[in-house]
Amino acid sequence: MIFREVEDRDLIAKARRGHVDAYNVLVSRWEKRVFNYLLRLVGHREDALDLSQDVFLKAYQNLKNLEDPAKFPGWLFRIAHNEAYSLLRKNRPEGELAVEPKTGGETSGRMFPMELTLAVQGALSRLSDDQREAVLLKVYQGFKFEEMAEILSCPVSTVKSRLYTALDLLKQTLAPVNMGGAE
Amino acid sequence: MNCSSEDLKAYFLGELSSRDKAPVEDHVHACQSCREELDRLKLTQTALLALEEEEVPQRIAFVSDKVFEPRWYQTIWRSGPAMGFASAVLLAAAILVHGYARPAGASSVTPTVDTAQIEQRIEREVGARLDTVVQKAVSDAQSKQAAEFAKVLDASEARFETRRKADLATIQQAAEYYEKQMNRWLVASNDTRAGQ
């Protein structure tokens, strides 16, 4: 992980000097994570792909503004978060943002075991956007509370609140699956 | 320590420091309810992680698009440290070359090299030196000729003098002869007159 971080730092430094190839390597490393984060957040593959392209374009254009290259992951996901929420606000009437998220029906992926995948997708889709995003950043992307607070532009206490509530809801929703898996 | 859902979740999510972690672990060992809650959280996480990541449908290709590549001057302009270093190296090299190549006391203004002017100057110099050599050669030749002429003249004069002396001697001998003949004729005439 340490070496990977150093390598990313080198790539960022090169990309800042105009080496497009270095930035391409950076994109190839992060595009899958960013795409899946956006896919699970907006629930639509085409939108997720378009957003991913926008994210990496904006990241490239603003790379010179990244003060600490070690914070590239959080900085990149902050751009992704902003892009995703711009789309969510545009697609939904004001005030309905955190009410009922889209279903994750299109995130088909590999369907084994199918029941578990569908159950998890269903459970995630029942969370609010904020709660789901907190789970995505913590469980799937492994960010720390402080990094999440920077990405989401909110206090750490808010991050904790969203995440803990989401975990309680997921725990209840997935309880039958977990029971089945435990048997 | 009492049961704390927040502490348990923070512990489960790896957000506690090693100092804060120990009391929670001790409590979980002792508390059946918290142990079960921790198990449920682990099962939930396992279920969530069963959702595999999807591959990106297509390569995000815009980055390699030429449109986004910086122009050559942007590349140079943006590389501030590189530009600074290159400038410093160039400056150092220039100072070094200047120090070695420039003779002491020479003008600080670098002369411009004018080939035509140099050629003219060389031509003039060569011409001048050639004239000098030619004049000296001509002068030497004239001196030599004058010396030879004088030598020839002296020889001619010597030969003329010798001839003149020879001629004078011949004339003198002829005069002496004619005088002797005249004397003989006079003596003969006197003897004839005396005999009559």
Image: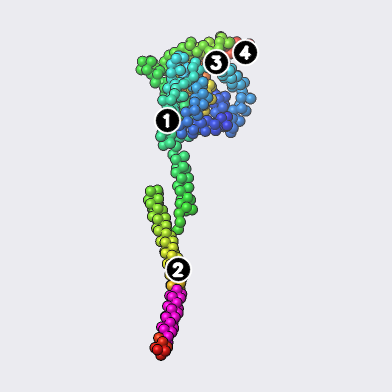
**Tag 1, which secondary structure?**
loop
* Range drawn in magenta: B162-188
Label pair 2/3, CB-CB below 8 angstroms: no
Discs 4/2, front: 2
Instruction: Report the magenta stretch's main SS.
Output: helix
Label pair 3/1, CB-CB below 8 angstroms: no
The residue that label 1 is drawn on is B70
Residues flagged by tags 1 and 2 on a common chain: yes
**Looking at the picture, which amino acid does disc 4 mark?**
Ala
In the rendered view, tell whether residue B193 sits above or below residue B57.
below
**Tag 3, which secondary structure?**
loop
Q: Could you say which quadrant of the image residue A182 lies in?
A: top right
Residue at 51 percent across and 20 percent down: it is A32
Looking at the image, tell me whether mark 2 or mark 3 is earlier in sequence order. 3
Which chain does tag 3 point to? B
Residue B152 is marked as: 2
Magenta segment: does it hold B119? no
Looking at the image, tell me whether mark 3 or mark 1 is earlier in sequence order. 3
Residue sitting nearer the eye, A84 or B166: B166
**Looking at the picture, which amino acid does disc 1 mark?**
Pro
Please state the horizontal and vertical placement of residue B88, each as a whole percent of the image.
Answer: 46, 45
Residue at 57 percent across and 24 percent down: it is B12
**What separation in Å lies between label 4 and label 2 (alpha carbons)?**
146 Å
In the rendered view, tell whether residue B101 sits above or below residue B62.
below
Dot 3 crowding, Cα within 10 Å, few <14, some 14–19, many 20+: many
**Looking at the picture, which amino acid does disc 3 mark?**
Leu
Please state the horizontal and vertical placement of residue A94, each as a whole percent of the image.
Answer: 36, 17
**What separation in Å lies between label 1 and label 2 (alpha carbons)?**
97 Å
The residue that label 4 is drawn on is A182
Q: Is residue B128 left or right of residue A5?
A: left
